[in-house]
Amino acid sequence: MAESATPGRRRGVELEHAIYVATLDELTANGYGRLTMEGIAARAGTGKAALYRRWPGKQPLVLDALRYALPPLPEPDPKRSPRENLAESLAALSDVLAGKTLVPGIEFIVDVLHEPDMRALFADKVIAPRLQRIEAILHEDVHGHEAVHPLAARTGPALILQTFLLTGGPPSPQELDLIIDTVLHGRATS
């Protein structure tokens, strides 16, 4: 029989989700550099002890909150073309950077650049799996006929990020089509 919590008191998954949302809200409001466990606890309506029982510090908490907030990686559909699968993956990335998800958006990513340890963890735990998915789609597209250059998977995300930096917004659907064309036709032939 499950233990019932007193009304208003959250436990388990419910409390964990509230902490994740509070972490993401604090990141949006204050940035990573000014993020504190105290601020997260206050925003979540819980004590610091509840946070420290689950996470030893803000880095692992932020990574778990990001994994919670990020939409799942789109699974390539074998019934669709590599172009369609790539379009879905790049559109999902664009939505994250545009703040259309719970992830704080491009401001957070820029903030993380100033924190070498967090940047390395973010690259390893968040970015790398997405690049691997894009690379797998590109390998599917070439059917073993030519090599996929290791930088090819980075090209689409880099062009999307560059669009944000230059315009302040996500690529238009037409620009996204051009990015996809660039990625699909910019493969190495060696």
Image (spheres, rainbow, N blue to C red):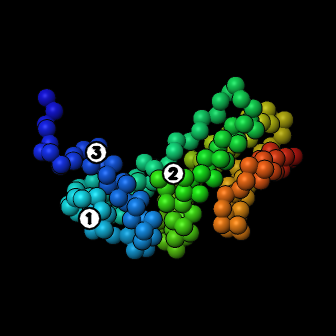
Q: Residues within 10 Å of mark 2 (few under 14, many from 20)?
A: some
Amino acid type, callout 2: Thr
11 vs 121, nearest the viewer: 11
Q: Which residue is mark 1?
A: 42
User: How many neighbours does mark 1 have within 10 angstroms: few (below 14), some (14-19), or many (20 or more)?
Assistant: some
Q: Position of residue 65 (x, y in %)?
A: 41, 54
Q: For residue 77, what is the image quadrant?
A: top right
Decide: is 186 above or below 114: above
152 left or right, relative to 56: right
The residue at the point 73 percent across, 53 percent down is 172
Residue at 49% in and 60% down: 104
Secondary element under disc 1, as helix, strand or loop, is helix
**N-term mark: 2 or 1:** 1
Q: Determine whether, in the image, residue 148 is placed left or right of residue 7.
A: right
Q: Which secondary structure lies at badge 3?
A: helix
- Amino acid beneath label 3: Glu
Q: Is residue 90 above or below residue 23?
A: above
Q: Earlier in the sequence, mark 1 or mark 3?
A: 3
Rounded to the nearest angstrom, the CA distance separating label 2 from label 1 is 23 Å
Q: Around disc 3, counting alpha carbons within 10 Å, would you say few (fewer than 14), some (14 to 19), or many (20 or more)?
A: few
Image marks 1 and 3: residues in contact by CB distance under 8 Å: no
**Secondary structure beneath label 2:** loop
Relative placement, left or right, of 126 versus 34 is right
Q: Which residue is mark 3?
A: 14
